Image (cartoon, grey):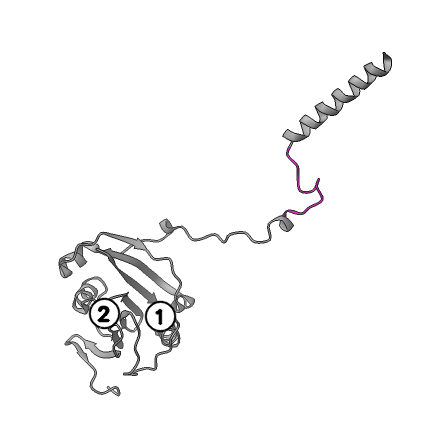
Amino acid sequence: MKDIFFSAIFFSVILSCSDGRQDAPLSYSKIGALKDSVSKTEPKESIPEDTFKINFNPYLFEQISGLKIDSVAVLIKNEVMDRVSQKNTEKVNIFIDSSTIQFKAWDFQDSTDLKIAWYNMLDCFGENCESIELYDTLFQIDKYNLVFVSGKSIDWISSSCNIDKRDWILYLKKERIQPKYLYVFETLVDENIVWYNFDDRGMQPKTNTND
């Protein structure tokens, strides 16, 4: 009887310990593993969209273009120009019907930062990082682009299909007033790049790239 009694106590203790271990959390140190060795790669934290301000004026653009904007959303996408320090940056996706227009604008501290950003842009333009020679007239790309470069700012409008540059000229005149642009170019889808002269007298295609 004693043997049976002690055996029963022994098994009850084993079972109670086993149940307790099922509920108790195990630390990495107790199982002989370091936390870092369990998860080598952790997802990178993305910058939340609500940390960006949208300064784009959809009401003004609708008045100018006659188009109805469905929505405007922050565009979290790094460009080569972002490597240069800026005073302000704005990048948005503008949704109109089934199309999307990207509007990106940078304001730089001085002309030196502007020049660095501008030549970075020419060295690596667009999603495929294509190089553009200044005043090259043969460059082509499969997307629409319209770029304005002043003494301290760059404005870049792009879309998968051609859009009316007049709407953006008028919008920039009211929202991002610049006395003169140093460089302006436009690429229609799969057509040769066009460079423009643009000052207070208006915007005209360059006839002489040495102007």
How many residues crowd mark 2 within 10 Å: few (<14), some (14–19), many (20+)?
some
How many residues crowd mark 1 within 10 Å: few (<14), some (14–19), many (20+)?
some
Q: Quadrant of residue 139?
A: bottom left
Left or right: 193, with 27 as reference point: left
Tag 1 residue? 126
Residue type pointed to by label 2: Gln
In the image, which disc is placed on residue 178?
2
Q: Quadrant of residue 55?
A: bottom left
Magenta segment boundaries in residue numbering: 25-35
Circles 2 and 1 in contact, beta carbons < 8 Å? no
Q: Is residue 29 magenta?
A: yes
Q: Is residue 49 magenta?
A: no
User: Residue 97: x percent and y percent?
Assistant: 21, 55
Q: Please, is residue 6 above or below residue 54 in the view?
A: above
User: Residue 43: x percent and y percent?
Assistant: 51, 52
User: Residue 138: x percent and y percent?
Assistant: 29, 83
Q: Nearer the viewer, residue 147 or 194?
A: 194
Q: Residue at x 20, y 86 (%)?
A: 207
Q: Nearer the viewer, residue 31 or 57?
A: 31
- Secondary structure predominantly adopted by residues drawn in magenta: loop
Q: Please, is residue 131 above or below residue 155 in the view?
A: below
